[in-house]
Image (cartoon, rainbow, N blue to C red):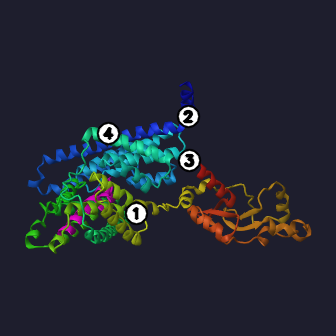
Amino acid sequence: MRSILNTFAEVIKTNKRYLRILLLSILIGVIVGMAAVAIKGGVREIEHLISKFNLKEHDFLYPIMPVLGIVITIFFVRLIVRDTIGAGISNVLYSINKRKGRIKRHNIFSSLVSSIITVGFGGSAGLEGPTITTGAAMGSNIGRILRLKEKELLILIGCASAGAISSIFKAPVAGVIFAIEVLLLELTLTAVAPLILASISSVLISFIFFGQESIYTIILTDKTYHLSNLLLYALLGICCGIISVGFSSIYIKYNDFSRKIGSGSLKIAIGTMIVGAGIYLFPSLAGEGFQYTNDNINGEVDDIFNNSIFERLKLFGVPVLLLAVIVITIKMLITSATLASGGVGGVFAPSLFIGSTLGISIAKSLENIGFGIDRTNFALAGMAGLIAGVIHAPLTAIFLIAELTTGYYLIVPLMIVSIVSYGMVKMFHNESIYTYQLVQKGLVITRHKDKATINKLSISGIIENDFLTVNPDCPMDELHGKLKNVRRNVFPVIDESKRLVGILTLNDIREYVFDRNNYEDLKVGDIMYYPETMVDYNDSIEDIVNKFEISRHYNIPVLKNGTYIGCISKVRLFETYRNHIKEVSYK
Protein backbone atom coordinates (compact mmCIF):
# COMPACT_ATOMS: atom_id res chain seq x y z
CA MET A 1 0.00 0.00 0.00
CA ARG A 2 2.82 2.36 0.93
CA SER A 3 4.58 1.66 -2.36
CA ILE A 4 1.39 2.48 -4.28
CA LEU A 5 1.02 5.78 -2.42
CA ASN A 6 4.69 6.60 -3.04
CA THR A 7 4.24 5.86 -6.73
CA PHE A 8 1.11 8.03 -6.85
CA ALA A 9 2.95 10.86 -5.07
CA GLU A 10 5.81 10.59 -7.54
CA VAL A 11 3.38 10.76 -10.48
CA ILE A 12 1.76 13.87 -9.03
CA LYS A 13 5.16 15.48 -8.43
CA THR A 14 6.35 14.70 -11.97
CA ASN A 15 3.14 15.87 -13.66
CA LYS A 16 2.28 18.77 -11.35
CA ARG A 17 1.98 21.33 -14.17
CA TYR A 18 -0.26 19.11 -16.25
CA LEU A 19 -2.48 18.28 -13.27
CA ARG A 20 -2.85 22.01 -12.72
CA ILE A 21 -3.99 22.37 -16.33
CA LEU A 22 -6.57 19.62 -15.83
CA LEU A 23 -7.96 21.36 -12.74
CA LEU A 24 -7.96 24.72 -14.52
CA SER A 25 -9.81 23.18 -17.47
CA ILE A 26 -12.62 22.15 -15.13
CA LEU A 27 -12.69 25.68 -13.68
CA ILE A 28 -12.80 27.21 -17.19
CA GLY A 29 -15.63 24.84 -18.11
CA VAL A 30 -17.65 25.96 -15.09
CA ILE A 31 -16.95 29.65 -15.84
CA VAL A 32 -18.00 29.27 -19.49
CA GLY A 33 -21.11 27.36 -18.43
CA MET A 34 -22.05 30.19 -16.08
CA ALA A 35 -21.32 32.72 -18.85
CA ALA A 36 -23.66 30.81 -21.18
CA VAL A 37 -26.36 30.81 -18.49
CA ALA A 38 -25.84 34.55 -17.89
CA ILE A 39 -25.87 35.46 -21.57
CA LYS A 40 -28.99 33.42 -22.29
CA GLY A 41 -30.70 34.71 -19.15
CA GLY A 42 -29.80 38.32 -19.97
CA VAL A 43 -31.24 38.05 -23.48
CA ARG A 44 -34.45 36.47 -22.13
CA GLU A 45 -34.88 39.26 -19.57
CA ILE A 46 -34.53 41.96 -22.23
CA GLU A 47 -36.92 40.11 -24.57
CA HIS A 48 -39.42 39.77 -21.71
CA LEU A 49 -39.13 43.49 -21.00
CA ILE A 50 -39.65 44.39 -24.66
CA SER A 51 -42.62 42.01 -24.94
CA LYS A 52 -44.56 44.31 -22.61
CA PHE A 53 -44.70 46.88 -25.42
CA ASN A 54 -46.95 44.46 -27.38
CA LEU A 55 -45.08 44.79 -30.67
CA LYS A 56 -47.78 42.95 -32.62
CA GLU A 57 -50.07 45.95 -32.17
CA HIS A 58 -47.30 48.49 -32.79
CA ASP A 59 -45.55 47.43 -35.99
CA PHE A 60 -43.33 50.51 -36.06
CA LEU A 61 -41.49 49.23 -32.96
CA TYR A 62 -40.22 46.10 -34.75
CA PRO A 63 -37.45 47.92 -36.61
CA ILE A 64 -36.80 50.47 -33.86
CA MET A 65 -35.86 47.98 -31.11
CA PRO A 66 -32.92 46.30 -32.93
CA VAL A 67 -31.61 49.71 -33.99
CA LEU A 68 -31.87 50.92 -30.39
CA GLY A 69 -29.94 47.85 -29.22
CA ILE A 70 -27.11 48.47 -31.69
CA VAL A 71 -26.89 52.15 -30.67
CA ILE A 72 -26.79 51.26 -26.95
CA THR A 73 -24.09 48.68 -27.67
CA ILE A 74 -22.00 51.28 -29.51
CA PHE A 75 -22.29 53.74 -26.60
CA PHE A 76 -21.39 50.97 -24.13
CA VAL A 77 -18.25 50.10 -26.11
CA ARG A 78 -17.18 53.73 -26.64
CA LEU A 79 -17.96 55.14 -23.18
CA ILE A 80 -17.31 52.20 -20.86
CA VAL A 81 -15.03 49.72 -22.63
CA ARG A 82 -13.15 52.40 -24.60
CA ASP A 83 -11.51 49.80 -26.79
CA THR A 84 -12.39 47.53 -29.67
CA ILE A 85 -14.05 44.32 -28.54
CA GLY A 86 -13.09 42.26 -31.56
CA ALA A 87 -15.15 39.92 -33.70
CA GLY A 88 -15.79 36.94 -31.45
CA ILE A 89 -14.05 33.79 -32.64
CA SER A 90 -11.90 35.80 -35.07
CA ASN A 91 -10.60 37.73 -32.09
CA VAL A 92 -9.75 34.47 -30.31
CA LEU A 93 -7.97 33.11 -33.40
CA TYR A 94 -5.98 36.34 -33.68
CA SER A 95 -4.93 36.09 -30.03
CA ILE A 96 -3.80 32.50 -30.52
CA ASN A 97 -1.80 33.22 -33.66
CA LYS A 98 -0.41 36.69 -33.01
CA ARG A 99 -0.63 37.47 -29.30
CA LYS A 100 0.56 34.12 -27.86
CA GLY A 101 -2.84 33.49 -26.31
CA ARG A 102 -3.11 36.87 -24.59
CA ILE A 103 -6.63 38.32 -24.65
CA LYS A 104 -7.52 41.74 -23.26
CA ARG A 105 -9.02 41.77 -19.77
CA HIS A 106 -12.10 43.76 -20.74
CA ASN A 107 -13.23 40.86 -22.96
CA ILE A 108 -14.13 39.02 -19.76
CA PHE A 109 -17.23 41.23 -19.48
CA SER A 110 -17.42 43.42 -22.61
CA SER A 111 -18.33 40.67 -25.10
CA LEU A 112 -20.97 39.26 -22.76
CA VAL A 113 -22.70 42.54 -21.92
CA SER A 114 -22.62 43.97 -25.44
CA SER A 115 -23.98 40.78 -27.04
CA ILE A 116 -26.82 40.63 -24.51
CA ILE A 117 -27.81 44.16 -25.50
CA THR A 118 -27.44 43.56 -29.24
CA VAL A 119 -29.32 40.25 -29.42
CA GLY A 120 -31.78 41.01 -26.61
CA PHE A 121 -33.11 44.05 -28.48
CA GLY A 122 -33.43 42.02 -31.68
CA GLY A 123 -30.13 42.43 -33.49
CA SER A 124 -29.59 39.55 -35.90
CA ALA A 125 -26.65 37.67 -34.38
CA GLY A 126 -25.74 34.64 -32.30
CA LEU A 127 -24.43 34.29 -28.75
CA GLU A 128 -21.90 31.50 -29.30
CA GLY A 129 -18.98 33.74 -30.34
CA PRO A 130 -19.32 36.17 -27.40
CA THR A 131 -19.60 33.24 -24.97
CA ILE A 132 -16.41 31.75 -26.37
CA THR A 133 -14.65 35.13 -26.18
CA THR A 134 -15.74 35.62 -22.56
CA GLY A 135 -14.47 32.20 -21.50
CA ALA A 136 -11.28 32.50 -23.55
CA ALA A 137 -10.52 35.90 -21.99
CA MET A 138 -11.04 34.45 -18.53
CA GLY A 139 -8.79 31.46 -19.30
CA SER A 140 -6.11 33.65 -20.86
CA ASN A 141 -5.97 36.06 -17.94
CA ILE A 142 -6.06 33.34 -15.28
CA GLY A 143 -3.19 31.66 -17.12
CA ARG A 144 -1.20 34.91 -17.24
CA ILE A 145 -1.70 35.47 -13.51
CA LEU A 146 -0.39 31.94 -12.88
CA ARG A 147 2.48 32.57 -15.36
CA LEU A 148 1.53 29.64 -17.57
CA LYS A 149 3.47 28.91 -20.74
CA GLU A 150 2.06 29.76 -24.14
CA LYS A 151 1.05 26.18 -24.95
CA GLU A 152 -0.84 26.01 -21.63
CA LEU A 153 -2.65 29.27 -22.38
CA LEU A 154 -3.72 27.85 -25.74
CA ILE A 155 -5.15 24.76 -24.04
CA LEU A 156 -7.22 26.94 -21.68
CA ILE A 157 -8.52 29.01 -24.61
CA GLY A 158 -9.46 25.76 -26.35
CA CYS A 159 -11.23 24.66 -23.17
CA ALA A 160 -13.31 27.85 -23.24
CA SER A 161 -14.34 27.22 -26.85
CA ALA A 162 -15.25 23.61 -26.17
CA GLY A 163 -17.18 24.60 -23.06
CA ALA A 164 -19.14 27.32 -24.86
CA ILE A 165 -20.47 25.02 -27.61
CA SER A 166 -21.04 22.26 -25.07
CA SER A 167 -23.08 24.42 -22.68
CA ILE A 168 -25.11 26.34 -25.27
CA PHE A 169 -26.13 23.31 -27.33
CA LYS A 170 -25.75 20.64 -24.62
CA ALA A 171 -23.41 18.88 -27.04
CA PRO A 172 -20.13 18.00 -25.27
CA VAL A 173 -18.64 15.96 -28.13
CA ALA A 174 -19.32 18.73 -30.66
CA GLY A 175 -17.68 21.21 -28.26
CA VAL A 176 -14.42 19.25 -28.19
CA ILE A 177 -14.43 18.80 -31.97
CA PHE A 178 -15.15 22.52 -32.49
CA ALA A 179 -12.09 23.51 -30.45
CA ILE A 180 -9.87 21.18 -32.48
CA GLU A 181 -11.39 21.90 -35.88
CA VAL A 182 -11.91 25.67 -35.73
CA LEU A 183 -9.10 26.75 -33.39
CA LEU A 184 -6.70 24.25 -35.04
CA LEU A 185 -5.46 22.83 -31.74
CA GLU A 186 -3.23 19.78 -31.94
CA LEU A 187 -5.00 16.45 -31.65
CA THR A 188 -2.94 14.83 -28.87
CA LEU A 189 -4.08 13.25 -25.64
CA THR A 190 -2.32 15.96 -23.65
CA ALA A 191 -4.41 18.63 -25.37
CA VAL A 192 -7.67 16.69 -25.70
CA ALA A 193 -8.03 15.57 -22.08
CA PRO A 194 -8.47 19.16 -20.75
CA LEU A 195 -10.94 19.89 -23.58
CA ILE A 196 -13.04 16.91 -22.54
CA LEU A 197 -13.01 17.94 -18.87
CA ALA A 198 -13.99 21.52 -19.75
CA SER A 199 -16.76 20.30 -22.04
CA ILE A 200 -18.15 17.97 -19.38
CA SER A 201 -18.08 20.54 -16.57
CA SER A 202 -19.65 23.17 -18.83
CA VAL A 203 -22.51 20.97 -19.99
CA LEU A 204 -23.21 19.95 -16.38
CA ILE A 205 -23.71 23.63 -15.49
CA SER A 206 -26.13 23.88 -18.42
CA PHE A 207 -27.99 20.78 -17.19
CA ILE A 208 -28.33 22.28 -13.70
CA PHE A 209 -29.96 25.49 -14.97
CA PHE A 210 -31.77 24.37 -18.13
CA GLY A 211 -32.32 20.63 -17.66
CA GLN A 212 -31.00 17.77 -19.77
CA GLU A 213 -33.44 18.08 -22.66
CA SER A 214 -32.14 19.19 -26.05
CA ILE A 215 -32.32 22.95 -26.65
CA TYR A 216 -34.51 22.22 -29.66
CA THR A 217 -37.86 20.50 -29.17
CA ILE A 218 -37.47 17.89 -31.88
CA ILE A 219 -40.50 15.72 -32.59
CA LEU A 220 -39.06 12.74 -34.42
CA THR A 221 -41.66 11.10 -36.64
CA ASP A 222 -39.19 8.98 -38.57
CA LYS A 223 -35.89 7.72 -37.13
CA THR A 224 -34.91 6.21 -40.46
CA TYR A 225 -34.12 7.44 -43.93
CA HIS A 226 -34.55 5.74 -47.24
CA LEU A 227 -31.38 4.85 -49.10
CA SER A 228 -33.06 6.02 -52.28
CA ASN A 229 -33.17 9.54 -50.79
CA LEU A 230 -29.41 9.85 -50.31
CA LEU A 231 -29.11 11.57 -53.68
CA LEU A 232 -31.65 14.11 -52.47
CA TYR A 233 -29.45 14.75 -49.43
CA ALA A 234 -26.54 15.28 -51.81
CA LEU A 235 -28.74 17.83 -53.64
CA LEU A 236 -29.43 19.49 -50.30
CA GLY A 237 -25.66 19.60 -49.70
CA ILE A 238 -25.16 21.41 -53.01
CA CYS A 239 -27.88 23.93 -52.11
CA CYS A 240 -26.31 24.43 -48.66
CA GLY A 241 -22.96 25.04 -50.33
CA ILE A 242 -24.47 27.66 -52.65
CA ILE A 243 -26.22 29.42 -49.78
CA SER A 244 -23.04 29.25 -47.65
CA VAL A 245 -21.07 30.88 -50.45
CA GLY A 246 -23.79 33.53 -50.66
CA PHE A 247 -23.68 34.18 -46.90
CA SER A 248 -19.88 34.42 -46.86
CA SER A 249 -19.88 36.71 -49.92
CA ILE A 250 -22.53 39.05 -48.52
CA TYR A 251 -20.77 39.16 -45.14
CA ILE A 252 -17.35 39.83 -46.69
CA LYS A 253 -18.56 42.41 -49.21
CA TYR A 254 -20.65 44.25 -46.64
CA ASN A 255 -17.69 44.41 -44.25
CA ASP A 256 -15.47 45.71 -47.05
CA PHE A 257 -18.12 48.29 -47.94
CA SER A 258 -18.48 49.30 -44.29
CA ARG A 259 -14.73 49.77 -43.87
CA LYS A 260 -14.58 52.06 -46.90
CA ILE A 261 -17.15 54.43 -45.40
CA GLY A 262 -15.15 57.29 -43.98
CA SER A 263 -17.72 58.51 -41.47
CA GLY A 264 -18.45 56.31 -38.47
CA SER A 265 -21.87 57.91 -38.06
CA LEU A 266 -22.75 57.19 -41.69
CA LYS A 267 -21.67 53.57 -41.29
CA ILE A 268 -23.92 53.20 -38.26
CA ALA A 269 -26.82 54.95 -40.01
CA ILE A 270 -26.65 52.75 -43.10
CA GLY A 271 -26.27 49.57 -41.06
CA THR A 272 -29.13 50.29 -38.70
CA MET A 273 -31.40 51.30 -41.59
CA ILE A 274 -30.77 47.94 -43.27
CA VAL A 275 -31.40 46.07 -40.01
CA GLY A 276 -34.58 48.01 -39.29
CA ALA A 277 -35.95 47.60 -42.82
CA GLY A 278 -35.18 43.87 -42.89
CA ILE A 279 -36.87 43.20 -39.58
CA TYR A 280 -39.85 45.35 -40.61
CA LEU A 281 -40.30 43.09 -43.65
CA PHE A 282 -39.81 39.92 -41.61
CA PRO A 283 -40.14 40.33 -37.82
CA SER A 284 -39.14 36.66 -37.45
CA LEU A 285 -35.57 37.59 -38.41
CA ALA A 286 -34.94 39.50 -35.17
CA GLY A 287 -32.50 38.06 -32.63
CA GLU A 288 -31.05 34.56 -32.78
CA GLY A 289 -34.06 33.13 -34.55
CA PHE A 290 -34.13 30.27 -32.03
CA GLN A 291 -37.93 29.95 -31.93
CA TYR A 292 -38.25 29.83 -35.71
CA THR A 293 -35.38 27.39 -36.09
CA ASN A 294 -37.30 25.18 -33.68
CA ASP A 295 -40.47 25.60 -35.76
CA ASN A 296 -38.57 24.70 -38.94
CA ILE A 297 -37.26 21.52 -37.38
CA ASN A 298 -40.81 20.51 -36.55
CA GLY A 299 -42.21 21.24 -40.00
CA GLU A 300 -43.69 24.72 -39.43
CA VAL A 301 -41.81 26.84 -41.97
CA ASP A 302 -44.89 29.04 -42.56
CA ASP A 303 -44.41 30.67 -39.15
CA ILE A 304 -41.47 32.62 -40.55
CA PHE A 305 -43.83 34.62 -42.75
CA ASN A 306 -46.28 35.51 -39.97
CA ASN A 307 -46.74 39.26 -39.43
CA SER A 308 -44.67 39.99 -42.54
CA ILE A 309 -45.68 41.84 -45.70
CA PHE A 310 -45.19 38.57 -47.59
CA GLU A 311 -47.64 36.62 -45.42
CA ARG A 312 -50.44 36.81 -47.99
CA LEU A 313 -48.22 35.69 -50.87
CA LYS A 314 -48.62 32.12 -49.62
CA LEU A 315 -52.33 32.35 -50.36
CA PHE A 316 -51.60 33.22 -54.00
CA GLY A 317 -49.54 30.07 -54.54
CA VAL A 318 -46.08 31.65 -54.47
CA PRO A 319 -43.62 28.72 -54.03
CA VAL A 320 -42.40 28.37 -50.47
CA LEU A 321 -38.84 27.85 -51.72
CA LEU A 322 -38.86 31.26 -53.41
CA LEU A 323 -40.15 32.94 -50.25
CA ALA A 324 -37.54 31.05 -48.22
CA VAL A 325 -34.74 32.30 -50.48
CA ILE A 326 -35.99 35.88 -49.95
CA VAL A 327 -36.04 35.35 -46.18
CA ILE A 328 -32.58 33.77 -46.20
CA THR A 329 -31.09 36.58 -48.29
CA ILE A 330 -32.50 39.24 -45.99
CA LYS A 331 -31.27 37.32 -42.94
CA MET A 332 -27.75 37.23 -44.39
CA LEU A 333 -27.82 40.96 -45.09
CA ILE A 334 -29.17 42.11 -41.73
CA THR A 335 -26.77 39.79 -39.85
CA SER A 336 -23.86 41.34 -41.75
CA ALA A 337 -25.22 44.85 -41.13
CA THR A 338 -25.82 44.17 -37.42
CA LEU A 339 -22.22 43.13 -36.83
CA ALA A 340 -20.55 45.64 -39.17
CA SER A 341 -22.44 48.65 -37.82
CA GLY A 342 -21.39 48.10 -34.21
CA GLY A 343 -23.50 45.23 -32.85
CA VAL A 344 -21.75 42.34 -31.09
CA GLY A 345 -22.53 38.70 -31.76
CA GLY A 346 -21.70 35.75 -33.97
CA VAL A 347 -22.86 33.94 -37.11
CA PHE A 348 -23.40 30.47 -35.62
CA ALA A 349 -27.07 30.88 -34.68
CA PRO A 350 -27.98 32.72 -37.92
CA SER A 351 -26.37 29.85 -39.85
CA LEU A 352 -28.57 27.34 -38.03
CA PHE A 353 -31.66 29.43 -38.78
CA ILE A 354 -30.75 29.71 -42.47
CA GLY A 355 -29.92 26.01 -42.72
CA SER A 356 -33.17 24.87 -41.14
CA THR A 357 -35.19 27.26 -43.33
CA LEU A 358 -33.45 26.01 -46.46
CA GLY A 359 -33.83 22.36 -45.48
CA ILE A 360 -37.53 22.43 -44.74
CA SER A 361 -38.41 24.59 -47.75
CA ILE A 362 -36.59 22.17 -50.07
CA ALA A 363 -38.34 19.25 -48.34
CA LYS A 364 -41.76 20.86 -48.90
CA SER A 365 -40.90 21.57 -52.53
CA LEU A 366 -39.86 17.95 -53.06
CA GLU A 367 -43.11 16.79 -51.43
CA ASN A 368 -45.08 18.85 -53.93
CA ILE A 369 -43.54 16.92 -56.84
CA GLY A 370 -44.08 13.50 -55.30
CA PHE A 371 -41.00 12.70 -53.19
CA GLY A 372 -41.51 11.29 -49.72
CA ILE A 373 -39.22 13.38 -47.53
CA ASP A 374 -39.14 13.77 -43.76
CA ARG A 375 -39.17 17.52 -43.14
CA THR A 376 -37.45 17.31 -39.75
CA ASN A 377 -34.58 15.26 -41.14
CA PHE A 378 -34.08 17.70 -44.01
CA ALA A 379 -34.20 20.74 -41.71
CA LEU A 380 -31.59 19.16 -39.41
CA ALA A 381 -29.38 18.21 -42.35
CA GLY A 382 -29.69 21.76 -43.68
CA MET A 383 -28.42 23.10 -40.34
CA ALA A 384 -25.39 20.82 -40.61
CA GLY A 385 -24.77 21.92 -44.19
CA LEU A 386 -24.69 25.63 -43.31
CA ILE A 387 -22.40 25.14 -40.31
CA ALA A 388 -20.03 23.06 -42.46
CA GLY A 389 -20.08 25.65 -45.23
CA VAL A 390 -20.08 28.96 -43.37
CA ILE A 391 -17.52 28.22 -40.64
CA HIS A 392 -15.67 25.47 -42.54
CA ALA A 393 -16.28 22.90 -39.80
CA PRO A 394 -17.90 19.74 -41.26
CA LEU A 395 -17.02 17.51 -38.30
CA THR A 396 -18.50 19.98 -35.83
CA ALA A 397 -21.64 20.16 -37.97
CA ILE A 398 -22.06 16.39 -38.10
CA PHE A 399 -21.62 15.74 -34.39
CA LEU A 400 -23.54 18.84 -33.27
CA ILE A 401 -26.70 17.83 -35.12
CA ALA A 402 -26.23 14.19 -34.13
CA GLU A 403 -26.12 15.22 -30.46
CA LEU A 404 -29.09 17.56 -30.86
CA THR A 405 -31.16 14.62 -32.11
CA THR A 406 -29.84 12.50 -29.22
CA GLY A 407 -28.82 9.78 -31.62
CA TYR A 408 -26.84 8.94 -34.74
CA TYR A 409 -29.66 7.68 -36.93
CA LEU A 410 -29.02 10.54 -39.38
CA ILE A 411 -25.24 10.20 -39.40
CA VAL A 412 -24.91 9.17 -43.07
CA PRO A 413 -27.15 11.95 -44.47
CA LEU A 414 -25.42 14.47 -42.18
CA MET A 415 -22.03 13.36 -43.47
CA ILE A 416 -23.19 13.62 -47.09
CA VAL A 417 -24.73 17.08 -46.71
CA SER A 418 -21.83 18.47 -44.64
CA ILE A 419 -19.01 17.27 -46.86
CA VAL A 420 -20.78 18.26 -50.10
CA SER A 421 -21.51 21.73 -48.71
CA TYR A 422 -17.97 22.14 -47.42
CA GLY A 423 -16.51 21.00 -50.74
CA MET A 424 -18.69 23.45 -52.66
CA VAL A 425 -17.63 26.37 -50.48
CA LYS A 426 -13.91 25.55 -50.68
CA MET A 427 -14.08 25.96 -54.45
CA PHE A 428 -15.10 29.61 -54.01
CA HIS A 429 -13.84 30.70 -50.58
CA ASN A 430 -10.65 29.27 -49.16
CA GLU A 431 -11.27 31.17 -45.91
CA SER A 432 -14.19 30.92 -43.53
CA ILE A 433 -16.02 33.97 -42.21
CA TYR A 434 -13.81 33.79 -39.12
CA THR A 435 -10.44 33.52 -40.87
CA TYR A 436 -11.30 36.01 -43.63
CA GLN A 437 -11.13 38.86 -41.12
CA LEU A 438 -7.64 37.73 -40.12
CA VAL A 439 -6.45 37.51 -43.71
CA GLN A 440 -7.42 41.18 -44.00
CA LYS A 441 -4.89 41.86 -41.23
CA GLY A 442 -2.19 39.93 -43.08
CA LEU A 443 -2.48 36.83 -40.89
CA VAL A 444 -2.91 33.51 -42.64
CA ILE A 445 -4.58 30.72 -40.68
CA THR A 446 -3.66 27.27 -41.91
CA ARG A 447 -3.87 23.64 -40.86
CA HIS A 448 -0.32 23.10 -42.17
CA LYS A 449 1.68 22.94 -38.94
CA ASP A 450 4.92 24.42 -40.33
CA LYS A 451 3.14 27.34 -41.99
CA ALA A 452 0.97 27.93 -38.94
CA THR A 453 4.05 28.09 -36.70
CA ILE A 454 5.91 30.40 -39.09
CA ASN A 455 2.94 32.78 -39.19
CA LYS A 456 2.96 33.02 -35.39
CA LEU A 457 6.47 34.46 -35.39
CA SER A 458 6.93 38.22 -35.15
CA ILE A 459 9.36 40.06 -37.44
CA SER A 460 10.36 42.32 -34.54
CA GLY A 461 11.68 39.28 -32.70
CA ILE A 462 14.08 38.19 -35.44
CA ILE A 463 15.58 41.49 -36.61
CA GLU A 464 19.27 41.84 -35.68
CA ASN A 465 21.06 45.16 -35.25
CA ASP A 466 24.68 44.09 -34.72
CA PHE A 467 25.64 44.55 -38.37
CA LEU A 468 28.31 47.17 -39.02
CA THR A 469 26.75 49.97 -41.09
CA VAL A 470 28.92 52.28 -43.17
CA ASN A 471 28.46 55.50 -45.12
CA PRO A 472 28.94 55.41 -48.91
CA ASP A 473 31.59 58.18 -48.56
CA CYS A 474 33.60 56.18 -46.04
CA PRO A 475 37.21 55.66 -47.33
CA MET A 476 38.33 52.05 -47.64
CA ASP A 477 41.26 52.52 -45.29
CA GLU A 478 38.84 53.72 -42.59
CA LEU A 479 36.65 50.63 -43.14
CA HIS A 480 39.78 48.47 -42.90
CA GLY A 481 40.38 49.77 -39.42
CA LYS A 482 36.91 48.73 -38.26
CA LEU A 483 37.08 45.14 -39.52
CA LYS A 484 39.00 43.71 -36.58
CA ASN A 485 35.97 44.09 -34.24
CA VAL A 486 33.37 42.85 -36.73
CA ARG A 487 31.60 39.48 -36.35
CA ARG A 488 29.46 39.73 -39.49
CA ASN A 489 30.52 39.49 -43.10
CA VAL A 490 27.76 41.79 -44.43
CA PHE A 491 27.91 45.59 -44.19
CA PRO A 492 24.74 47.62 -44.95
CA VAL A 493 25.60 50.95 -46.58
CA ILE A 494 23.31 53.77 -45.39
CA ASP A 495 23.30 57.53 -45.94
CA GLU A 496 22.76 60.35 -43.43
CA SER A 497 18.95 59.87 -43.51
CA LYS A 498 19.36 56.13 -42.69
CA ARG A 499 18.27 55.09 -46.15
CA LEU A 500 19.81 51.91 -47.46
CA VAL A 501 21.88 52.76 -50.54
CA GLY A 502 23.81 49.53 -50.94
CA ILE A 503 25.41 46.41 -49.48
CA LEU A 504 29.00 45.25 -49.08
CA THR A 505 30.22 41.77 -48.15
CA LEU A 506 33.57 40.65 -46.88
CA ASN A 507 34.17 38.94 -50.22
CA ASP A 508 33.65 42.24 -52.04
CA ILE A 509 36.45 43.95 -50.14
CA ARG A 510 38.78 40.99 -49.67
CA GLU A 511 41.16 41.96 -52.55
CA TYR A 512 41.44 45.52 -51.26
CA VAL A 513 42.08 44.44 -47.66
CA PHE A 514 45.18 42.46 -48.63
CA ASP A 515 46.54 45.15 -50.98
CA ARG A 516 46.38 48.56 -49.33
CA ASN A 517 47.73 50.25 -52.49
CA ASN A 518 44.48 49.33 -54.31
CA TYR A 519 42.25 51.52 -52.18
CA GLU A 520 44.21 54.65 -51.52
CA ASP A 521 41.45 56.86 -52.95
CA LEU A 522 38.70 54.25 -52.96
CA LYS A 523 35.42 54.75 -51.10
CA VAL A 524 32.71 52.32 -50.04
CA GLY A 525 30.30 53.78 -52.59
CA ASP A 526 32.68 52.80 -55.40
CA ILE A 527 32.38 49.04 -54.84
CA MET A 528 29.04 48.57 -53.08
CA TYR A 529 26.03 47.08 -54.90
CA TYR A 530 22.31 47.55 -54.43
CA PRO A 531 20.68 44.39 -53.00
CA GLU A 532 18.18 42.68 -55.25
CA THR A 533 16.29 41.24 -52.26
CA MET A 534 15.02 43.21 -49.28
CA VAL A 535 12.43 42.68 -46.57
CA ASP A 536 9.73 45.20 -45.76
CA TYR A 537 8.77 45.42 -42.09
CA ASN A 538 5.16 44.57 -43.00
CA ASP A 539 6.07 41.39 -44.88
CA SER A 540 4.70 38.15 -43.45
CA ILE A 541 7.16 35.61 -42.08
CA GLU A 542 6.14 33.24 -44.85
CA ASP A 543 7.10 35.90 -47.43
CA ILE A 544 10.46 36.31 -45.73
CA VAL A 545 11.10 32.56 -45.82
CA ASN A 546 10.30 32.57 -49.54
CA LYS A 547 12.76 35.44 -50.12
CA PHE A 548 15.51 33.45 -48.44
CA GLU A 549 14.70 30.43 -50.59
CA ILE A 550 14.64 32.40 -53.86
CA SER A 551 17.67 34.63 -53.22
CA ARG A 552 19.80 31.98 -51.45
CA HIS A 553 21.18 34.77 -49.26
CA TYR A 554 21.90 34.23 -45.58
CA ASN A 555 21.30 37.84 -44.52
CA ILE A 556 18.68 40.23 -45.90
CA PRO A 557 18.28 43.93 -44.93
CA VAL A 558 14.96 45.13 -43.46
CA LEU A 559 13.33 48.44 -44.35
CA LYS A 560 10.55 50.23 -42.48
CA ASN A 561 8.98 53.09 -44.41
CA GLY A 562 12.08 53.09 -46.59
CA THR A 563 14.47 53.39 -43.62
CA TYR A 564 17.02 50.70 -42.75
CA ILE A 565 16.33 49.15 -39.31
CA GLY A 566 18.47 46.00 -39.33
CA CYS A 567 18.92 42.64 -41.02
CA ILE A 568 17.37 39.21 -40.74
CA SER A 569 19.65 36.21 -40.84
CA LYS A 570 18.53 32.82 -42.04
CA VAL A 571 20.14 31.18 -39.01
CA ARG A 572 18.24 33.43 -36.55
CA LEU A 573 14.94 32.90 -38.37
CA PHE A 574 15.04 29.12 -38.26
CA GLU A 575 16.46 29.05 -34.75
CA THR A 576 13.47 31.12 -33.60
CA TYR A 577 11.18 28.76 -35.49
CA ARG A 578 12.64 25.69 -33.79
CA ASN A 579 12.39 27.30 -30.35
CA HIS A 580 8.74 28.20 -30.98
CA ILE A 581 7.98 24.62 -32.00
CA LYS A 582 9.38 23.44 -28.66
CA GLU A 583 7.41 26.09 -26.80
CA VAL A 584 3.94 25.34 -28.19
CA SER A 585 4.09 21.62 -28.96
CA TYR A 586 2.07 19.32 -26.73
CA LYS A 587 3.74 16.14 -25.59
Name the element at disc 4.
helix
Q: Which of marks 2 and 1 is in front?
A: 2
Kind of residue sitting beneath label 4: Ile
What residue did someone put label 2 on? 11
Task: Classify mark 2: helix, strand or loop.
Answer: helix
Q: In this view, does 489 lie above or below 26?
A: below
Give the SS element for disc 1: loop
Q: Residue at x 32, y 39 (%)?
A: 205
Marks 4 and 3, the one that precedes in the sequence: 4
Q: Where is residue 262 in the image (x, y as percent from the top left)?
A: 37, 63
Q: Mark 4 points at which residue?
A: 205
Q: How far apart are marks 4 and 2 (CA)?
A: 30 Å
Left or right: residue 489 versus residue 174 is: right
CA gap between label 1 and label 4 equals 30 Å
- Residue 157 on image: x %, y %: 44, 46
Q: Distance between the residues labelled 4 and 3?
A: 30 Å
CA gap, disc 2 and disc 1: 43 Å
Residue that badge 1 annotates: 432
Nearest the eye: 351 or 486: 351
Nearer the viewer's eye, disc 1 or disc 4?
A: 4
Mark 3 = which residue?
Answer: 587
Choose top left, top right, bottom left or bottom right for residue 207: top left
Which of the two marks, 4 or 3, is nearer to us in this view?
3
